[in-house]
């Protein structure tokens, strides 16, 4: 008799505007602006424009990552870590809702393999995943050299079709395949996640944007809210 080694389910969560009632990428830049680390006049308009492009599905991910990762290369890791700790307390914990915590907790209490899959870079999102108790994070990876950030991305950005490539690689690294799971779920709010939503057996739209809401209802996908 061969014992099954794969969990029965694979459960994936988008982060921004799904588990969070806000966007951690956007909030990180706004936090640095508020601290005076980034010039408000130069950066705030660009941050808002990138957010609009993301919402419209027209974002150039490489242009955005250049904008978002460059500041990491200009400061020491000690400074960045201190800012991130304060950022978690002041900007992120207030936008983690009780329904989101319950949904993730229910997944973790079962036999599923659970991961957060996000386009936002690992530096910003690693402590957020820990706050949810999720040990597996599939995120955009900022490049590091000798412990310092270079301001560049390494590998495929975890965005749109890139999320599928990054999840494939993560699963392979654990010795799993998609076929090893009886079911797979992905929760997301965004039209940008339609590729990965189309890859899983059970896509779920969470507080979706207009495009995803329309697509989900046309295809009979569940539509839920995690907002309090």
Image (tube, rainbow, N blue to C red):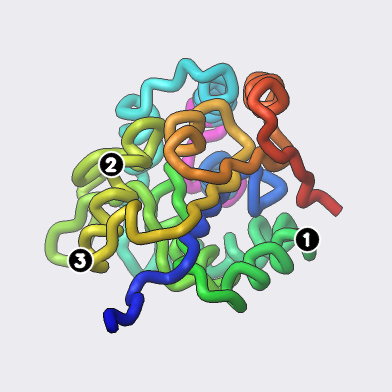
Q: How many marks?
A: 3
Local packing at callout 3 (Cα closer than 10 Å; few below 14, some 14-19, many 20+) is few
Q: Earlier in the sequence, mark 3 or mark 1?
A: 1
Q: Earlier in the sequence, mark 3 or mark 2?
A: 3
Residue 162, above or below 86: above
Q: Nearer the viewer, residue 3 or 77?
A: 3
Pointer 1 residue: 99
Badge number at residue 87: none
Q: Which residues are magenta?
A: 34-43
Residue 204, above or below 82: above
Q: Nearer the viewer, residue 182 or 195?
A: 182
Q: Name the residue located 24 percent from the left edge and 52 percent from the top edge.
A: 169
Q: Name the residue located 54 percent from the left edge and 53 percent from the top edge.
A: 13
Residue 69, above or below 129: above
Q: Is residue 149 left or right of residue 23?
A: left
Q: CA distance from mark 3 to mark 1?
A: 36 Å
Q: Position of residue 153 (x, y in %)?
A: 24, 43
Q: Name the residue located 59 percent from the left edge and 24 percent from the top edge.
A: 55
Quadrant of the rendering where the C terminus is positioned: bottom right
Q: Position of residue 168 (x, y in %)?
A: 28, 49
Mark 3, mark 1: which one is toward the viewer?
Answer: 1
Pointer 3 residue: 147
Q: Is residue 4 left or right of residue 223?
A: left
């Amino acid at each position: 008799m061969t014992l099954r080694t794969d969990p029965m389910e694979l459960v994936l969560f988008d982060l921004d505007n799904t588990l969070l009632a806000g966007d951690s990428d956007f909030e990180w830049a706004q936090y640095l602006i508020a601290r005076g680390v980034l010039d408000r006049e130069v950066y705030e308009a660009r941050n808002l424009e990138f957010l609009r492009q993301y919402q419209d599905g027209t974002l150039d991910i490489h242009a955005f990552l250049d904008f978002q990762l460059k500041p990491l290369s200009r400061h020491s890791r000690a400074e960045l870590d201190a800012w991130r700790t304060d950022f978690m307390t002041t900007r992120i914990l207030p936008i983690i809702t009780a329904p989101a915590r319950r949904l993730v907790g229910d997944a973790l209490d079962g036999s599923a393999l659970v991961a957060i899959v996000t386009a936002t870079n690992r530096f910003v999102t690693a402590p957020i995943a820990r706050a949810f108790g999720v040990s597996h994070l599939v995120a955009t990876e900022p490049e590091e050299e000798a412990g310092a950030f270079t301001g560049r991305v390494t590998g495929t950005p975890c965005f749109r079709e890139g999320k599928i490539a990054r999840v494939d690689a993560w699963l392979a690294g654990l010795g799993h395949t998609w076929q090893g799971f009886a079911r797979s779920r992905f929760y997301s709010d965004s039209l940008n996640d339609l590729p990965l939503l189309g890859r899983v057996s059970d896509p779920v739209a969470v507080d979706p944007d207009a495009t995803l809401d329309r697509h989900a209802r046309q295809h009979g996908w569940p539509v839920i809210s995690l907002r309090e």
